[in-house]
Amino acid sequence: MSALLQLNQTTIRFGGLTAVSKLDLVVNEHELIGLIGPNGAGKTTVFNIVTGVYQPTEGTITFDGEPTARLKPYELAKLGIARTFQNIRLFASMSVFDNVRTAVQLHRPHGVRNALWRGREFHDSEKGVETQVMDLLDIFNLGRFRDSDSKSLPYGDQRRLEIVRALATKPKLLLLDEPAAGMNPSEKTELMKLIQFVKDKFQIAVLLVEHDMQVVMGICERIAVLDYGVKIAEGSPVEIRKNPKVIEAYLGEESIKT
Amino acid sequence: MLMARPRTFLLAALTASVVLGFFQSQIDLYYVDVLTKIAINITLAVSLNLINGYAGQFSLGHAGFMAVGAYTAAAMTMFLGPKILPAQAPVALTLIWFLLALYAGGLVAATAGLLVGAPSLRLKGDYLAIVTLGFGQIIAVVFRNIEPLGGALGLNGIPAYTNLFWVFGVAVLTTYVVTTMVNSTYGRGFLATHDDEVAAEAMGVNTTRYKIVAFVIGAFFAGIAGGLYGHFNLTINPRGFDFNKSIEIVVMVIVGGMGNTRGVILAAVLLTLLPEGLRAMAGWSPLLKWIGESRPLLYSILLIGIMLLRPQGLFAFGKRTVKVK
C-alpha cells in the first residue's frame, strides 16, 4: 500500500484561531479511513484544505506524489479528489441526469467548438457521456429518476446522487462529509454497505468524516480523532474505542474518573 | 426544445432572413423599422441571457458593450472605410466592409467584456451588478469625451447599411450560438456555475473560465447589435447607451425568464411592440396616452409584479428555465 494523500504538519489559522494544528495524516490507496471528533474539531476544515477551498497556513500536502499547494479545487478534482458536502449541494436547476453529466465532462475531450458545430464528433461524444452517466446511475439504482429534478428526490437518494456525482469525476480519493447526517438506523446500515461497495467497486480510497460512531466503527479500517484542531489519536476502531483521550474528548473528563 | 435539429434551424432561419432582406423594399417603412428593432432587441436579450440567466452573473452593463460595438463599427465604415476602399466601390465590397466593421465591433466589445469580466468576476451578486453598472456609466463618459467620435453630440451620418437580412441573420446566429453552447455537456458548466459555485468547482468545473466565456460571448453579440443599431439609426450618441438601455434589456430577460431563450425572445418581441402599440392607441383615450408616455414607470411596475408573482418569467412552461434563487 502506498500513500495517496499525505498531510505534513498542516496548519491553518483564521485570524487568531488555529482551526487545524500541525496535522499529520496519511491516506493510503484503497483505504477507508475515518476522521472523527466533536463539533468544531476542524474536520470539515481539513476537507476544505484537502480540496483546495482553503490554503494551509503552514505545512505541505501531497496527493499522488504531487504537492497540491495553490491548486484550485477544480484542478484537484482533475487530479482525482472528489467530495460530497455536509449540507447536500446538488445543482438545483438541473435534472438528476444533468447533475452527473456536469461531473462526467471533467475527463472528456469537449469544447465550445464541437458544441457549436454539432458534427458527428459532438453526437458521438454526447452519446458516450449518456452511456457513462446512465451506467453510473444504474449501479446506484437512480436510473429511474433520470429526468427528475435533483431537488425532488427523497433525502437519502439526494445523498446517493451526490456520491454518484462525485464518482463521475473518476476520483482516486473520495471525501465524504457526514454522509449519515439525518439518516435513520436502517438508512445508516444501507449507507455503510454503500460506502463499502463504492470503495471495492471503484477501487478508490475513502476519507470519511462522520459523527455517527456506529457508522465509523463499523466500516473504517483506521480512524483519526481530531479535537480542537489537534490529532489526539489514530488507530484501528478497537484501539480508538479504548483510547482514554478519545473518551475524554467525547464524553468529558468527569466520566472517566467515575 | 428550441431546436431539436439546430443546424436545420440555423439554415432555415438564415434562409428566412435572406428572403426577408430581399423583400424589404416591398414592406412598409414603419414595419421595417419595428422589425429591425425587434431583431436587434432579440440579439441583445438572448446574449444577455447567457450572462444573467444561464451563468447567473448579474450584469447591468449590456448597453456599454453595445456602445463599444456601435462606435467601433461606425468608425470603421465612416472614417476608415473611405480611406481604404476605392471611391465608387462596388456594392459587394462595401457589404464585406460592413461585415468586417460589425465583426470588429463585436471583437472590441468582447475585449471590453474580458477586461471588465476578468477582474470583477471575483465579485458576486449585487457587487458584480454594481461594477457592471459602473462600467456602463464609464463607457458613456468616455465616448462623451472623445472628440474625434463626436463627443456629446455623437456620430451623425452613419451609412445606412443595416437591413432586415443583417439584423435577423445576427439574431438567428446569436440564438444558435447560445442555445447550442448551453445545450451540451460542455454547457452544463454554465448552469453549474449558476447553481452552486463551490460544488461546481469541486466537480472539476472551472467556474471562472465559464463566467469569462459567458461575458466575452455575451459582449461580442451585444457589440454586433450595437453596430447594427448604429447603421440603422444613422446616428449614435452616448446617451443612447445609458443605464436605461441596459435596464430595458435586463427587463426583457427577466420577463422572458432567466435561462429560457425561447421566453426571452418572446419578451424581446413583445416589449418592442408594446411602446409601438401604446403609441398607436394613444389617441383612443387620455389614459392610454399617459401609459404610453410613462413607459419607465410601467416597466418598473411590470418588473415588481413579475418578481412577486412569477419569478421564473412569464413564458416559463418547460423545464429549461434556470431556477431563481
Image (cartoon, coloured by chain):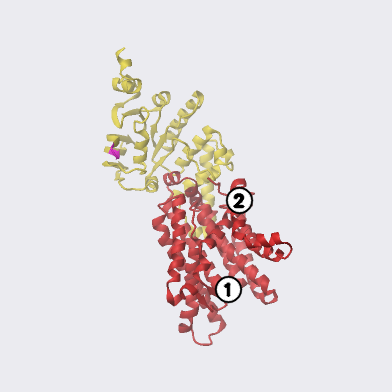
Q: Where is residue B159 in the image (x, y as percent from the top left)?
A: 55, 79
Judged from the image, the secondary structure of the residue bearing numbered disc 1 is: helix
**A3 relative to B227, above or below:** above
Q: Is mark 2 on a helix, strand or loop?
A: loop
Indicate the amino acid at tag 1.
Phe
Q: Is residue B121 left or right of residue B185?
A: left
Kind of residue sitting beneath label 2: Gly
Shade of chain B as shown in the rendered figure: red
**Which chain hosts label 2?**
B
In terms of sequence position, does the residue under pointer 1 or pointer 2 come before the other?
Answer: 1
Against A122, is A238 above or below?
Answer: above
Q: Colour of chain A?
A: yellow
The residue positioned 62% from the left and 69% from the top of the image is B36
Which residues are the magenta region? A11-16
**Disc 1 marks which residue?**
B232
Going by the picture, which residue comes out furthest to the bottom? B87
> Dot 2, how many residues are within 10 Å of its Cα: few (below 14), some (14-19), or many (20+)?
many
Q: How crowded is mark 1: few (under 14 residues within 10 Å), some or many (20 or more)?
A: many
Q: What residue lies at 55% left-to-right and 40% top-to-bottom?
A: A150
Residue B289 at least partly seen: yes
Asked if residue A51 is among those painted magenta in the image, a careful observer would answer no
The reply to whether callout 1 and callout 2 are in contact (CB within 8 Å) is no
Query: Which residue is the site of mark 2?
Result: B313
Q: In this view, does B36 lie to the left or right of B70?
A: right
Where residue B218 appears, as percent x and y from the top left, is 50, 60
